[in-house]
Image (cartoon, rainbow, N blue to C red):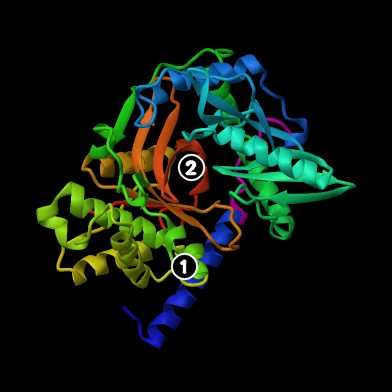
Amino acid sequence: MKRAAGMVGGIFLKKVALFAFALLLLFANSGVSFANNDPSLGKAKHLNQENVLQIVQTNLDSYLKTDLQTHDKKISASKDFVPLYDLDHNLFAYMVPLLENNREIGYITVGAIEDGYATYEINIRDQAVSGIKAKLKEKSAHSNGKGEVVYIPPFDYLIKVSDQGQDRYYDLADEPREVTDIVKPKKEKLKEGYNRIRNDENKKHMSELLGSTITTAAVTSENVALSVERDYGMFVPVEYATNTYSYGGDQGWYSTGTKQDRGCGPVAAANITNYLAKIKDSAKYGKLYVGNTTSKTDFVAHMDTLYSYVDPGMFGEVSGPDFTSDVERFAKDRGVTLTGVRSSASFTLDNVANYIKAGLSINSPVATLNTKKWSDYEYEWHWMTITKYFRDSNDNRWIAVSTWGQRRSIDYRVHFDAMANGWVQGGVMYFQ
């Protein structure tokens, strides 16, 4: 589908304006109460190893005990932590390897400072930590310098090598690519994100988890998920290699670099429309996707179709309302009635959680826009698809998402911070 030139120009100007508005919201966000007078990480107080292991165990006993990827596993935490730093060599978090029968099956990223988030993300992938360590060792030896892993929440990691006073950065691709020229111009802006994480609310939650303050009354546990998650099935399983299936679409499957850079919104739309057609109600939504879900060829064609509707533009798709109306228009053209569920509630931690649960409760995937995504594309804000919301009695909260064809679990508080520009920029959306 092609748009008339005037329409494209209008959309472009609208997205530029929306992007500028979102930046103003980011810069204006100065209401954070820091737990001390110095918000930088240089003087932060750190957790000890026992504290970190206690936080991990809490999540082993709750979220990971029943989660799709780990429910049948006897998991323990390794004490061989990988320290994670900010861009100024300040300790920020730990990557804690997760073991099953002494075999590494993934990791959980745990905060290292007393007034930050307790947890950040979980990645269940065999030998993930060993792979990062190997890349770190290789780059450090090759550069004759000292190396470390830099962490940019919610789930971006870089290798930093310092040699003769010069810092060089590499991504964690199979063949690590140097990204120094991308990181350095953004360094000061990225540092602001670390500092914003430190606040009194996070310090209170951390101290309650560790039992160093009087714990408030336990909250009600919640586990709300799509039907495939509840039944331990796979979300939009595309066979991208022989007998190897994804967890939703991967924008890396697009044929051009431009689409790969900007295509996360269309992929989220493709995930949602596929799921509604194939899982939720084929009689009502079947025309939204007529291909074979497991066929990569069919699904990529569907991704391309949704790209023409969502039409990300040079800044990617930065508007929740635009994303919603584009998906609705696609459905209408297929003869399907589909409506995005709007919310008039204030954009708070609990209200957004309630919205996510409402979508998942009717078996409708929830699109979400993370405005703090860091990548090699300067204006890429990242769309993902939420498939699960979890909260335990200690008020640890997690969401499971589909991103780049993978299933990742993100601390819900961390994600809320990454979309705190309201329903328009950085919001959530489901359809019925």
Task: Give whichever of 362, 168 is nearer the camera.
Answer: 168
Instruction: Tell me the quarter of the picture where residue 218 sits.
Output: top left
Measured from the top left, where is residue 233 in percent x and y?
27, 37
Instruction: Name which residue type carries label 2.
Output: His
Task: Give whichever of 297, 153 is nearer the camera.
Answer: 297
Q: Indicate whether residue 31 is drawn in magenta.
A: yes
* Identity of the residue furthest to the right in this view: 164
Indicate which disc residue 259 carries: 1
Categorize mark 2 by other alpha carbons within 10 Å: few (<14), some (14-19), many (20+): many
Query: Looking at the image, do the residues carrying marks 2 and 1 touch, with CB atoms under 8 Å apart?
Result: no
Q: Which residue is mark 2?
A: 415
Measured from the top left, where is residue 184 in percent x and y?
74, 56
Q: Indicate whether residue 82 is drawn in magenta.
A: no
Q: Is residue 320 above or below residue 228?
A: below
Measured from the top left, where is residue 270 in percent x and y?
32, 59
Measured from the top left, where is residue 48 in percent x and y?
67, 18
- In this figure, what is the number of numbered marks? 2
Would residue 26 be visible to someone looking at this image?
yes
Task: Give whichever of 360, 196 is nearer the camera.
Answer: 360
